[in-house]
Image (cartoon, rainbow, N blue to C red):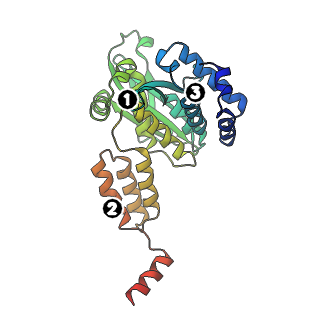
Amino acid sequence: MNIKTLEQEEKFETITDRLKDLGMSKEKALQEMAFAIELAKSNKQLSNCSAVDIFNCIIELASLGLSLNPAKRLCYLVPFYDRHRKESVPKLMPSYMGLEKILTDSKAVQHIACHVVWEGDEIEMDLADEQQPIKRHTPYITIGQQKGSLVMVYSVATLASGVKIVEYMSREEIDHIRDTYSKSKDVWKASYTEMARKTVIKRHTKHLPKSLYTERVYKAIDLDNQVTGQVEVGYKKLGYLEKLLGTSGFDPEKKARLEREIADIQYDFEYKGMLHYLQDNQVESDKDKFERMIKDE
């Protein structure tokens, strides 16, 4: 597989037109394809993937606003063997830095950073302080300590208002997510720290302000879940619940409480329960009222 081969594909012009609609120029598309080819050179499975599948990954990449540039480490191409097609198929896997980029692209989040706390580090937190929740985090190496095991991972998001929101998870909580919801353990064995950071960013996303980029974030997380085999409730479903909540007849205080409950949903039975509850409490439109009145008469 090479650039000339990709350019000669019948669908190439159609694909580049679609990419242009997503904000990616033909030159940028060729650059991303070049990155894909470089990745394929070091991965036999990836080199056997079809040009059409590579095109589809580039389209998804453009819709997320990410890049395969290895220097940026925003997104990866991961080959999987498709038993039905009996061939290798590439899938996009956003990194935790890719998720951070999408969140900051929204402008609702000015900055977000995820950090690992190791045994030997010193950290002081005050979650009640919205301006400086992390008072101090001193890495083990700067105070002459030995690096121990991973203790926790936390992320700090600075909103447009200047308020900082913190999300954190202990090693035990992260391992619970891995053991309970991830079908594929190989990616965790290969990149435990990366996956731990991504797990915290995913949870953090649920509690950050919604924006025009929210759907993009949800799509990126769902793509990652496909690669890692996550079986928890998809973010598209959570997004649908949030839309239903917005059109419900609840007062602001109850909406705020239900929003927090939606963010914590993990199991399918929890999703279905909330779905039915919100559907039963939708604000009736004038048209619905009129049709009901006619029916009652």
Q: Is residue 281 visible?
A: yes
Looking at the rendered structure, the secondary structure element under dot 2 is helix
Q: Earlier in the sequence, mark 3 or mark 2?
A: 3
**Count of marks, rendered view:** 3
Three-letter code for the amino acid on which mark 1 is drawn:
Arg
Residue 46 in the image: above or below residue 177 = above
In the picture, the disc for residue 287 is none
Q: Earlier in the sequence, mark 2 or mark 1?
A: 1
Residue 246, image x, y percentages: 46, 61
Q: Which residue is mark 1?
A: 83
Q: Earlier in the sequence, mark 1 or mark 3?
A: 3
x, y percentage for residue 282? 41, 68
Which residue type carries mark 2? His
Q: Which is closer to the viewer, label 3 or label 2? A: 3
Q: Give coordinates of residue 190: x percent, y percent.
A: 38, 18
Quarter of image, res 202: top left
User: What's under tag 3, amino acid-wise?
Assistant: Ala
Q: Residues within 10 Å of mark 1 (few under 14, many from 20)?
A: few
Residue labelled with disc 2: 276
Q: Is residue 71 visible?
A: no
**Which residue corresponds to mark 3?**
51
Image position of 167 (left or right of 183) = right
Q: Secondary structure at mark 1?
A: loop
Q: How much space separates mark 3 and mark 2, taking CA atoms?
A: 43 Å
Q: Residue 283 placed where, x, y %? A: 44, 71
In the picture, measured across the screen, residue 164 lies left or right of residue 195, that is right
Nearer to us of marks 2 and 1 is 1
Q: Residue at x 52, y 46 (%)?
A: 215
